[in-house]
Amino acid sequence: MSRNRKRGLLKRLQWGVECSSFLALERLGAFFAMPSLWRAGAGLSVVGRLFSSRWNIVRSNLRTAVGPTTSEEEISVLTREVFRHTAANLLTALKSAQLPSPLVREVLAPENIEVFERAFGKGKGVILVSAHMGNFELLAQGLGAFRPEIRIAGIYRPLNNIYLDTIIRERRAHRGMKLFAKLTSYHGPIKWVRNQGVLGIVADQRAGRSGSITPFFGRLMSMSPLPAFIHKHTGAPIIGISMKTTSPGRWKVAFHELEISEGENVTTAHIASLLETIVTQSIVDVFWMQDLWRMNIKRPLKIPGRKGPIRLEGDRNKPLYPFSILVRVPDNGREFAQTIPALTALAHSRPDCDLHLLARERIRDAADSSGVAHTFHSIEGNKLPPGLVLAIAFTDHERTARELAHLYAGPTYTLSAAMQSRENWHSIPIEESLSPEARWLGLARSLGMHDPPLQWTYV
């Protein structure tokens, strides 16, 4: 038996086990009422403590969403609540997909329904924007249970498990819901909306190279342009939908208007603002397990995206969440001067760049007169601020790099000559024949530095 065939059989066996487990849990869940399932899920959330990486991701996401003034104690409380609500919502979702319409109406309480009715009454279809929050299976079924005459569709990402994917699609479609696979042609969704259908889009995910760069809770990310794109081609109104747990096994679903001026073009920045409104209805009901602002290890300075950064005119003066970079610069004045072109380019490469320079105290004056916006930290101080995202060594001196390694344990990038044998250190090959100025610029560019720099587009 070939290795590929053996791997294929093992994968199908794994899928079969996962599918059987899902069906068994679904059948077991059918014997319990929604409140009981919710409480059971909340109780099982203690298992989340075993997944320390997810715990840290949730804390990081919450820190961005609730702002820097929130204490660490409050973040810890919110993190525990997120794990409780996530586990409870996932467990109740097992029962939700097959609930009859009367029971769906019993556990869901609509709010601001007139927002949806006004939008739908325009006769152009409706684009429903949501975040990953609440009992998502129930949310997918909810509108069809209240208004079965409305044609509803959604954009979904097919599951890797082909057996489970078939079951989930059947569950979501049993009230006539149409599903369009993500990353396929958008002709189908556009046609659906033009024919006065309702299209649901979950938009609080990283969109990568195909997205538009925009602030989300003040932190730059690549977000899906799909809601704005479909609106442009259909003229359909965009409204938001949120879901909040009101008691065990009961949820409130609210509709939210998109804030936009008459004649103004809808952009991804408008969608990001709408999503902020949606998410803040119930922070703890949001699925924060995804690393929304994940850094690419190979090109950490780059924000992927086709367009942007785009920002609302009214947010022009709002502070951005800083992308804090620590740079170990040489302790010699002449060698430090050779890094200034790269430091200048780095500081201007993206609007959220927050540059921190690390060197011996004797370089402070040279750094202050360099014209590069930065915060200086002396080696002698033996202390660095929290919140640093990564470090770069603009030196090929092994001793200098070793001092950086003693102070900073996060992702660090350097030339091979100064490489330290540490888990988070990454060696970047740069042609040695280049001038020092060109080498440091080359190092920054190889890490994804935006060149030319990103420039705001205000809408």
Image (cartoon, rainbow, N blue to C red):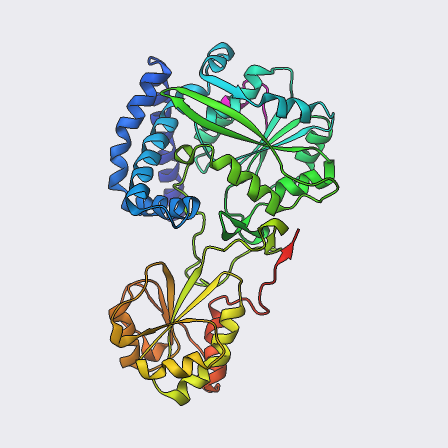
Residue 15: in magenta span: no
**The N terminus sits in image quarter:** top left
For residue 319, side relative to residue 236 (left or right): left
Q: Nearer the viewer, residue 312 or 225?
A: 312
Q: Quadrant of residue 274?
A: top right
Q: Position of residue 442 (x, y in %)?
A: 49, 76
Q: Measured from the top left, where is residue 130 in percent x and y?
A: 53, 34
Q: Which residues are magenta?
A: 171-178
The residue at 59%/56% (across/down) is 309
**Residue furthest out toward the bottom:** 334
Position above or below: 198 against 451: above
Identify the residue shown where x is 43% and y is 52%. 294
Q: Residue at x 51, y 52 (%)?
A: 221
Q: How many marks?
A: 0
Residue 214: x, y in percent?
A: 56, 51
Against 436, residue 442 (above or below) is: above
Relative height, residue 276 to residue 453 (above, below): above
Residue at (32, 39) in percent of width and height: 79
Does the rendering let one see residue 402? no
Residue 397 image offset from top left, x and y in percent:
32, 82
Front residue of this view, candidates 456 and 86:
456
Relative placement, left or right, of 395 versus 180 is left
In the image, taking residue 148 as reference, residue 89 lies left or right, namely left
Note whether residue 275 is visible: yes
Q: Is residue 368 above or below residue 320?
A: below
Q: Is residue 174 magenta?
A: yes
